[in-house]
Amino acid sequence: MKIDRLIGILSILLQQEKVTSPVLAKKFEVSRRTIHRDVEDLCKAGIPIVTKQGTDGGIAIMDGYKIDRTLLTTAEMQAVLKGLQSLDSISGGNKYQTLMDKLSVNNSDILSTNNHILIDLSSWNTKSLAPKIELFQGAIEGRKLVSIRYFSPNGDSERTIEPYLLLFRWHSWYIWGYCRLREEFRLFKIGRMDEIKVLREPFEPRKVEEPVDSQMETFYQEGLRITAAFDHSVKWRLMEEFDLKKLKLGEDGRIYIEFVWWDKEALFGYLLGFMDKVQIIKPEELREEFLSVVERVAGKYKE
């Protein structure tokens, strides 16, 4: 549509010092004449656009002119507001609602027509998690060191970290930062830490290693590789937690899955959640350990 093209042209002019009509014509798949008419329409709307002929010529907005309004289409504005709305689900409050109201001023229909998607990033322990997230947000913005007590399967430890990124993945919140103790970038689960203190001491930002292709992908790969058989009645749950391609239907009617888990204790806890609907197939030594755990659990009740 013409209005979308006009907004697109204006957005480009705001981001670049100048641009030529052939470039705009190619980008929007229209003729140069159409681009010139669009430029005239923008000038009529009060946008001071200047054109210059020659090898160093082009189309540009007059120096010193500023546009305060956000140049977004309705669909793009809806996406922005929906993202802001999801942030309020973290804190359990409505601190981002004020920003949403400012962005949608004189456009109240934008919010009313954007209610077909609901993004809820909250967890069952929102009241304890939200303050931690806010502390890390402030530390990241202020480049301040953070001291924490961190709990893991290997026990708890005191850590000082340089926080760089808040991350929501695997249904949980994490902080990606440089651990002064281990002297490397690490992924810390926020729900496993307490005694969080933002220190006065700032840190000099270092080159940040991206977590996506490094530790995050090896978070599971370095763990235990097992094959387990699940009763068909729990397929609904397996579909939520595994790639469908991993689910193999066996001749006995059970669903066989080969997967990797990061920690033995966490694995046994996960499998116990399926009660008698799961059986470890291999490795054999893991079958024996799991049987020992089940027997100890049973012994608690026999006593």
Image (cartoon, rainbow, N blue to C red):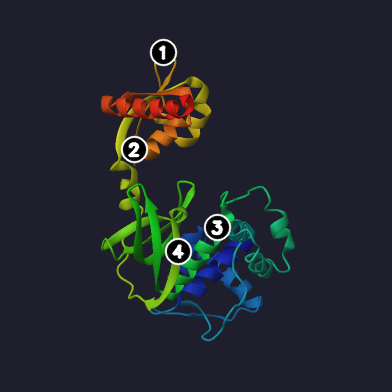
Horizontal side of residue 60 vs 73, given as left or right: left
Mark 4 belongs to which amino acid?
A: Glu
Q: Are marks 3 and 2 in contact (CB under 8 Å)?
A: no
Q: What residue is shown with label 1? A: 252
Residue 168: x, y in percent? 47, 53
Q: What residue is shown with label 4? A: 195
Tell me the element at label 4.
strand
Which image quadrant for residue 281? top left
How far apart are labels 1 and 2 at the CA level?
A: 27 Å
Residue neighbourhood size for the residue with mark 3, other residues' Cα within 10 Å, grouped as few (<14), some (14–19), many (≥20): few
How far apart are labels 1 and 3 at the CA level?
A: 45 Å
Q: What residue is shown with label 2? A: 264
How far apart are labels 4 and 3 at the CA level?
A: 12 Å
Tell me the element at label 2.
helix
Mark 1 belongs to which amino acid?
A: Asp
Residue 136: x, y in percent? 46, 66
Looking at the image, which is closer to me, 297 or 245?
297
Q: Can you tell which mark lies on residue 128?
A: 3
Up-down: is 280 above or below 57? above
How far apart are labels 1 and 4 at the CA level?
A: 51 Å
How far apart are labels 2 and 4 at the CA level?
A: 27 Å
Residue at the spot 67% in from the left edge and 47% down from the top edge: 116
Residue neighbourhood size for the residue with mark 4, other residues' Cα within 10 Å, grouped as few (<14), some (14–19), many (≥20): few
Residue at the spot 37% in from the left edge and 39% down from the top edge: 265
Residue at the spot 26% in from the left edge and 27% down from the top edge: 285
Of callouts 4 and 3, which one flags the residue occurring earlier in the amino acid sequence? 3
Of callouts 1 and 3, which one flags the residue occurring earlier in the amino acid sequence? 3
